[in-house]
Amino acid sequence: MKNSTQNIVTIQDIDPEIKSVFIPGEEVLLIASQARAKPGGTLSTPNKIYVTNMRVLHKDPKLFGLKADIIDVAFKDISNVEMKRGVFSTQIH
């Protein structure tokens, strides 16, 4: 659980599927989860983004969490980040 005074990410906060793709020495710095009840949110399986000291990992669950796409992008491959807000959703490009 995250400590509210220090914002520490513990091993319990990290999804097992994400842990399985870690590179030796990789540490999670931030976890962001899609809102469940707001427009664009998913009630059963929200998307999550994990920012590590080496890359960004995006977990996109499918079929009510039975499957998931995990996309990882190394920091050296990121040249720009753009956020598009819509009425019912927000996208990060």
Image (tube, rainbow, N blue to C red):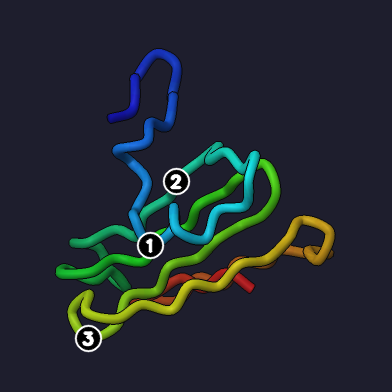
- Assess disc 1: are there few (<14), some (14-19) or many (≥20) residues with their C-alpha within 10 Å of its C-alpha: few
The residue that appears at 55% across and 73% down in the rendered structure is 71
- Assess disc 2: are there few (<14), some (14-19) or many (≥20) residues with their C-alpha within 10 Å of its C-alpha: some
Residue type at mark 3: give it: Leu
Q: Residue furthest bottom?
A: 63
Residue type at mark 2: give it: Ile
Q: Residue 1 in the image: x percent, y percent? A: 28, 30
Cα–Cα gap, marks 2 and 3: 22 Å
Quadrant hosting residue 4: top left
The residue that appears at 48% across and 57% down in the rendered structure is 49
Q: Please name which of the two marks, 2 or 1, marks the residue nearer to the observer.
A: 1
The residue that appears at 50% across and 70% down in the rendered structure is 85
Q: Residue 88 in the image: x percent, y percent? A: 34, 77
Which disc number belongs to residue 17?
1
Of callouts 2 and 3, the N-terminal one: 2
Quadrant hosting residue 2: top left
Which residue is denoted by mark 3 in the rendering?
63
Which residue is denoted by mark 2 in the rendering?
31
Which secondary structure, mark 2? Answer: strand
The residue that appears at 51% across and 41% down in the rendered structure is 30
Q: Residue 18 in the image: x percent, y percent? A: 44, 58
Which secondary structure, mark 3? Answer: helix
